[in-house]
Amino acid sequence: MSNHLTESKPENLKTLQRVIFPPAEQMDTVPLYVDSGQAAGVQLSTMNGALGTDDSLPTGKKKSSDQDSSGSSAASSEAHAEDFIDRRSTLIRAGSRLSFATYFNAFPASYWKRWTSIDDIRLSVHTQGEGTVIIYKSNARGSLQRVDSRRVTGKTHSTFDLPLKPFGDGGWYWFDLIAGNDTLTLEKADWEGYTDSTSAPGRITLEITTLNKPDFCLNNLRSLAQSPEAMDAIEELLIVDQGNKKVQDEEDFEEVAASLKGKLRIINQSNLGGSGGFSRGMYESVQNGSDYALLLDDDVVVEPESIIRLLTFADLCRKPTIVGGHMFDLYNRTVLHTFGEIVNTYRFQPDLPHEDQTLGHDFMKSNLRNTPWLHRRVDVDYNGWWMDLIPTKVIKELGLALPVFIKWDDAEYGLRAKRAGYHTVSLPGAAVWHVSWIDKDDLVGWQAYFHIRNRIIAALLHSPYERGGRLLRESSYADVKHLISMQYFTEHGRIMALRDVLAGPDRLHEIQPQRLPEIRSLTKQYSDAQFKEDIEEFPEPHMNKPPRNGRGFKAPSYKTLVPWALKTVTKQLVKPVDEESHEHPQAHIAHQDNRWWRMSQYDSALVSNAEGTAVSWYRRQPEQLRTKLFEATRLHADILRNWPSLRKQYREAASRITSLEAWKQTFDQHTDSELKR
């Protein structure tokens, strides 16, 4: 590759992505930044272009690179954290090799080719000492290809001009450094792009919606204050505080606020949910003249470099584009939650774009080079609002979020934008660490109301199927599962949700702050919603009749599911409740064992919550099943029968209820105070 600019290329070079290292307090994330393993890629057939899978395995049984018994796919543990000099530079020990084929430092070339005006890039590497720089690339199948290499001695600035043309469907660039007989120092490295643009970078309003997580908020504000490059891009730092544990009341708030040089503003408003908080951030970004609104969850740890990368990418997109960051697990920091999501419009459920993509990928077990599906570009319908950069041009045209409190606001906005011709990109190399879903079960409890209501509303707005595909059928199945599992509180919320769907869109703003306290007030009526931290406060579990033949309970097969369900529902309706189960639960069920086919066999049981912090007592009540199943079935039938008219009603109201004007009225009613620091 040429080391010099050609006459046909514009002279303007813009830094697209800087090579970085983890901060001192995040050494458990080293595999996301550097890898000291060998530069070996996934094995691919040279005959048929196979995707690095074993063709002898049945469909859906592909060998996972995480399961390679040789351990060759695992990120090496030989990277030395003590060699990191600062966030931009590191030592490579004599005779050692350091690879930047990693999540944060490889260059996601296919995304830049597909979405931006950049055609060619330059890698700029500043080194001190003797060694070798080797450039690699991959294709969409994960096949590794050596591109170029250069010997370096003394203080050297090496540049490599690289085309983006070969990256139509996927692929990355990266480089390795190999030290000679003495240490080699990487002083800094940058991926740069050739561009005709001379425009100044866009300006960001960074908004965090929070509910009683002031410690998370202050930690992220400290991190931002220590990243001057990120702060330079931020017009305003906005915290929309919807809790009763206020960020501004924290002991060291004033000190943190002072470090942000007048850019921090706090808005205290009623709890309007995620959609109300994020809509406030979007609204304020339009009002203050920002080019972008960057939405962040409160329970995250931010990699500040991600902000610069999102902004740079968005600025260089061919047309206004929503650009989001990925989510890593806050409590297992090398685990990537998902690489991108779409909406399965037939089931109207979040889904993965490709069947070979996996959830919860651990880079500690399988590095970038040895995980072929990570090399295929993933095109998405939306990005989670744990970190999402939205151009204010898009906001002005499309409006703000649906007033739906929580759940489906981000997915619906992505679908709305896509329908209007604005795409969403989940950009590799930009991410936050977020509290994962592993200790949550938001399909049970108070959140069940918001899940089903908002899912149906989003489907009414965006489903291409005449009556929503499988959505209502699957929702009816869920009613049966909850009821035969003795989850009567959950089902009460779902019935409220169906009624609110039928009530139409014009009350959504009015009920936005009301439904959560109303639902939580119902917990007094249902023992399955009343939790105690100490299991000793409950009677000792005891079961009069042991399981048949000592085998326990098994899930029904697909062939027997329908007759099994009919038999089980009938039995629960007519079989008397074991009298002793009123006084003693029959078993203690761990959360992971709380499955509908198991719970349906009990008259009463103690059940642990998802967090493992408390226990509730489930009690079978045939009358609850009878009345709630009848009502849920009736409401589903009403929605199915009236789907065309409801769809028309919601679609006609969508632009009105998501407008800046409609949301302003809600904000004016529910704003408590503002604070500028």
Image (cartoon, helix red, strand yellow):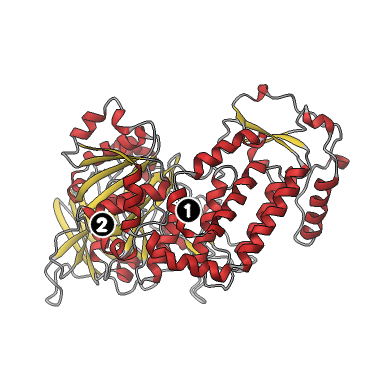
Q: Residue at x 34, y 64 (%)?
A: 398
* In front: label 2 or label 1: 2
Q: How dense is the environment of label 1, judged by Cα within 10 Å: few (below 14), some, or many (20 and up)?
A: many
Q: Which mark is residue 19?
A: none
Q: CA distance from mark 2 to mark 1?
A: 39 Å
What amino acid does circle 2 point to?
Answer: Tyr
Q: Is residue 219 left or right of residue 584?
A: left
Of callouts 2 and 1, the N-terminal one: 1
- The reply to whether residue 238 is visible in this rendering is yes
Q: Quadrant of residue 486?
A: top right
Residue beneath the point at 58% across and 33% down: 612
The spot of residue 380 in percent (x, y) is 43, 64
Q: Which quadrant of the figure contains the N terminus?
A: bottom left
Give the residue pinned by disc 2. Answer: 292
* Mark 2 crowdedness (10 Å alpha carbons): few <14, some 14-19, many ≥20: many
Which of these two is toward me, 514 or 610?
A: 514
Tell me the quarter of the picture where residue 670 sits: top left
Q: Position of residue 575 (x, y in %)?
A: 85, 43
Q: Position of residue 30 (x, y in %)?
A: 36, 43
Q: Which residue is mark 1?
A: 73
Q: 576 or 535, which lies in front?
A: 576
Q: Is residue 308 left or right of residue 601?
A: left
SS label for mark 1 = loop
